Image (cartoon, rainbow, N blue to C red):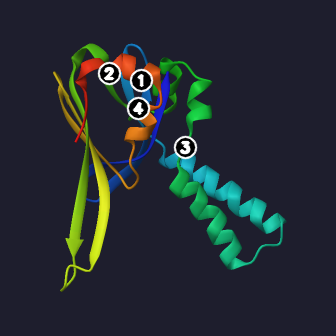
Amino acid sequence: MGVITVLEHQRSFLKTDLVNMVVTPSQLLCVPVNKLVKAGVEQADADARAQNKGFFGRYKDKMNVVWASNFSPHFFSMTPEDIVQETPETIQIPINAVQEFTIKKIVTVSGEDDEWTTESWNVLIRAKNGSYTFLSRADPSGQVESNPSIIAVLGNTFHKL
Protein backbone atom coordinates (compact mmCIF):
# COMPACT_ATOMS: atom_id res chain seq x y z
CA MET A 1 0.00 0.00 0.00
CA GLY A 2 2.78 2.42 0.87
CA VAL A 3 6.23 2.90 2.32
CA ILE A 4 7.46 5.67 4.60
CA THR A 5 11.21 5.98 4.17
CA VAL A 6 14.27 7.51 5.84
CA LEU A 7 13.31 6.82 9.44
CA GLU A 8 15.66 6.02 12.30
CA HIS A 9 14.82 3.80 15.26
CA GLN A 10 16.91 3.76 18.42
CA ARG A 11 17.00 0.05 19.21
CA SER A 12 19.39 0.42 22.15
CA PHE A 13 21.73 3.02 23.60
CA LEU A 14 24.38 2.41 20.93
CA LYS A 15 22.30 0.88 18.12
CA THR A 16 20.25 2.88 15.64
CA ASP A 17 18.53 1.26 12.68
CA LEU A 18 17.58 2.93 9.43
CA VAL A 19 13.96 1.94 8.87
CA ASN A 20 11.41 1.85 6.06
CA MET A 21 7.84 1.56 7.36
CA VAL A 22 5.71 -0.61 5.09
CA VAL A 23 2.00 0.16 5.49
CA THR A 24 -0.33 -2.73 4.64
CA PRO A 25 -4.10 -3.01 5.18
CA SER A 26 -3.53 -5.20 8.23
CA GLN A 27 -0.26 -3.99 9.79
CA LEU A 28 2.64 -1.58 9.93
CA LEU A 29 5.97 -3.28 9.25
CA CYS A 30 8.90 -1.25 10.58
CA VAL A 31 11.72 -2.85 8.61
CA PRO A 32 15.38 -2.20 9.47
CA VAL A 33 17.14 -1.60 6.15
CA ASN A 34 20.75 -1.48 7.39
CA LYS A 35 21.70 -4.60 5.40
CA LEU A 36 20.06 -3.24 2.24
CA VAL A 37 21.86 0.10 2.72
CA LYS A 38 25.19 -1.69 3.16
CA ALA A 39 24.64 -3.71 -0.03
CA GLY A 40 23.60 -0.53 -1.87
CA VAL A 41 26.70 1.34 -0.66
CA GLU A 42 28.95 -1.51 -1.80
CA GLN A 43 27.24 -1.54 -5.22
CA ALA A 44 27.50 2.27 -5.52
CA ASP A 45 31.22 2.06 -4.69
CA ALA A 46 31.77 -0.66 -7.30
CA ASP A 47 29.84 1.33 -9.93
CA ALA A 48 31.78 4.51 -9.13
CA ARG A 49 35.10 2.66 -9.36
CA ALA A 50 34.03 1.23 -12.73
CA GLN A 51 33.40 4.81 -13.86
CA ASN A 52 36.89 5.80 -12.64
CA LYS A 53 35.52 8.25 -10.08
CA GLY A 54 37.90 9.56 -7.46
CA PHE A 55 37.53 9.42 -3.71
CA PHE A 56 35.01 12.27 -3.47
CA GLY A 57 32.92 11.00 -6.38
CA ARG A 58 32.71 7.56 -4.80
CA TYR A 59 31.92 9.08 -1.40
CA LYS A 60 29.09 11.18 -2.88
CA ASP A 61 27.56 8.17 -4.64
CA LYS A 62 27.73 6.08 -1.47
CA MET A 63 26.20 8.83 0.68
CA ASN A 64 23.34 9.22 -1.79
CA VAL A 65 22.42 5.59 -1.06
CA VAL A 66 22.57 6.15 2.70
CA TRP A 67 20.50 9.34 2.73
CA ALA A 68 17.89 8.08 0.30
CA SER A 69 17.42 4.74 2.10
CA ASN A 70 14.33 4.22 -0.03
CA PHE A 71 13.67 0.57 -0.68
CA SER A 72 10.02 0.93 -1.73
CA PRO A 73 10.46 -0.99 -5.00
CA HIS A 74 12.10 -3.85 -3.09
CA PHE A 75 9.21 -4.08 -0.62
CA PHE A 76 6.44 -3.63 -3.20
CA SER A 77 7.59 -6.84 -4.86
CA MET A 78 7.20 -8.82 -1.61
CA THR A 79 4.41 -10.10 0.60
CA PRO A 80 4.39 -9.00 4.25
CA GLU A 81 5.36 -12.54 5.21
CA ASP A 82 8.36 -12.41 2.86
CA ILE A 83 9.46 -9.09 4.35
CA VAL A 84 9.37 -10.49 7.89
CA GLN A 85 11.15 -13.65 6.78
CA GLU A 86 13.91 -11.61 5.08
CA THR A 87 14.27 -9.27 8.08
CA PRO A 88 13.15 -11.07 11.26
CA GLU A 89 13.88 -8.01 13.45
CA THR A 90 10.99 -6.19 11.75
CA ILE A 91 8.61 -4.55 14.23
CA GLN A 92 5.06 -5.66 13.41
CA ILE A 93 2.19 -3.45 14.59
CA PRO A 94 -1.35 -4.61 13.77
CA ILE A 95 -3.43 -1.78 12.28
CA ASN A 96 -6.32 -2.57 14.61
CA ALA A 97 -3.93 -1.99 17.55
CA VAL A 98 -2.83 1.50 16.39
CA GLN A 99 -4.45 4.13 18.59
CA GLU A 100 -2.43 7.13 17.44
CA PHE A 101 0.00 7.83 14.59
CA THR A 102 1.52 11.29 15.02
CA ILE A 103 4.18 13.19 13.10
CA LYS A 104 5.62 15.95 15.24
CA LYS A 105 8.09 18.59 14.09
CA ILE A 106 10.98 19.25 16.48
CA VAL A 107 12.98 22.48 16.16
CA THR A 108 16.26 22.67 18.05
CA VAL A 109 18.01 26.00 18.52
CA SER A 110 21.58 25.99 19.74
CA GLY A 111 24.77 28.01 19.86
CA GLU A 112 25.74 30.95 22.01
CA ASP A 113 23.50 33.37 20.17
CA ASP A 114 20.92 30.79 19.04
CA GLU A 115 22.52 30.89 15.60
CA TRP A 116 21.94 27.21 14.71
CA THR A 117 18.52 25.83 14.07
CA THR A 118 17.89 22.23 13.13
CA GLU A 119 14.62 20.54 12.27
CA SER A 120 13.68 16.92 12.69
CA TRP A 121 10.45 15.01 12.95
CA ASN A 122 9.32 12.33 15.35
CA VAL A 123 6.93 9.65 14.15
CA LEU A 124 5.13 8.48 17.27
CA ILE A 125 2.98 5.37 17.20
CA ARG A 126 0.88 4.55 20.22
CA ALA A 127 -0.59 1.06 19.98
CA LYS A 128 -2.28 -1.39 22.30
CA ASN A 129 0.93 -3.42 22.43
CA GLY A 130 3.30 -0.49 23.14
CA SER A 131 4.65 2.82 21.90
CA TYR A 132 7.22 3.34 19.18
CA THR A 133 9.22 6.42 18.21
CA PHE A 134 11.06 6.97 14.95
CA LEU A 135 13.17 9.98 13.98
CA SER A 136 13.31 11.55 10.53
CA ARG A 137 15.67 14.25 9.29
CA ALA A 138 13.17 15.12 6.52
CA ASP A 139 9.44 15.72 6.93
CA PRO A 140 7.72 12.33 6.39
CA SER A 141 4.20 13.80 6.42
CA GLY A 142 4.33 14.34 2.65
CA GLN A 143 4.88 10.61 2.15
CA VAL A 144 1.80 9.92 4.26
CA GLU A 145 -0.49 12.69 3.01
CA SER A 146 0.30 12.12 -0.68
CA ASN A 147 -0.66 8.44 -0.49
CA PRO A 148 -4.45 7.98 -0.17
CA SER A 149 -3.94 4.29 0.67
CA ILE A 150 -1.85 5.15 3.74
CA ILE A 151 -4.38 7.79 4.82
CA ALA A 152 -7.21 5.27 4.42
CA VAL A 153 -5.38 2.67 6.52
CA LEU A 154 -4.37 5.08 9.30
CA GLY A 155 -7.75 6.84 9.29
CA ASN A 156 -8.41 9.16 12.19
CA THR A 157 -5.36 7.88 14.11
CA PHE A 158 -3.13 10.12 11.92
CA HIS A 159 -2.18 13.50 13.37
CA LYS A 160 0.37 16.09 12.29
CA LEU A 161 1.71 18.51 14.90
Does residue 21 appear anywhere in the picture? no
Residue situated in front as seen by the camera: 103 or 14: 103
Residue 45 lies left or right of residue 135; in this view the side is: right
Mark in front: 4 vs 2: 4
| Circle 4 residue | 145
Give the mark nearest the N terminus, 1 or 3: 3
Q: Count how many numbered circles sit on residues in the image.
A: 4
Kindly report the distance in space between the C-alpha atoms of the residues bearing marks 4 and 2: 11 Å
Residue situated in front as seen by the camera: 38 or 100: 100
Q: Position of residue 78 (x, y in %)?
A: 58, 22
Q: Residues within 10 Å of mark 3 (few under 14, many from 20)?
A: many
Q: Position of residue 90 (x, y in %)?
A: 39, 32
5, above or below 62, in the image? above
The residue positioned 41% from the left and 32% from the top of the image is 144
| Circle 3 residue | 70
**Three-letter amino acid code at the position of disc 3:** Asn
Give the mark nearest the N terminus, 4 or 2: 4
Residue 151 lies left or right of residue 101; in this view the side is: right
Quarter of the rendering containing residue 48? bottom right
| Circle 2 residue | 154
Q: Are marks 2 and 3 in contact (CB under 8 Å)?
A: no
Q: Residues within 10 Å of mark 1 (few under 14, many from 20)?
A: many
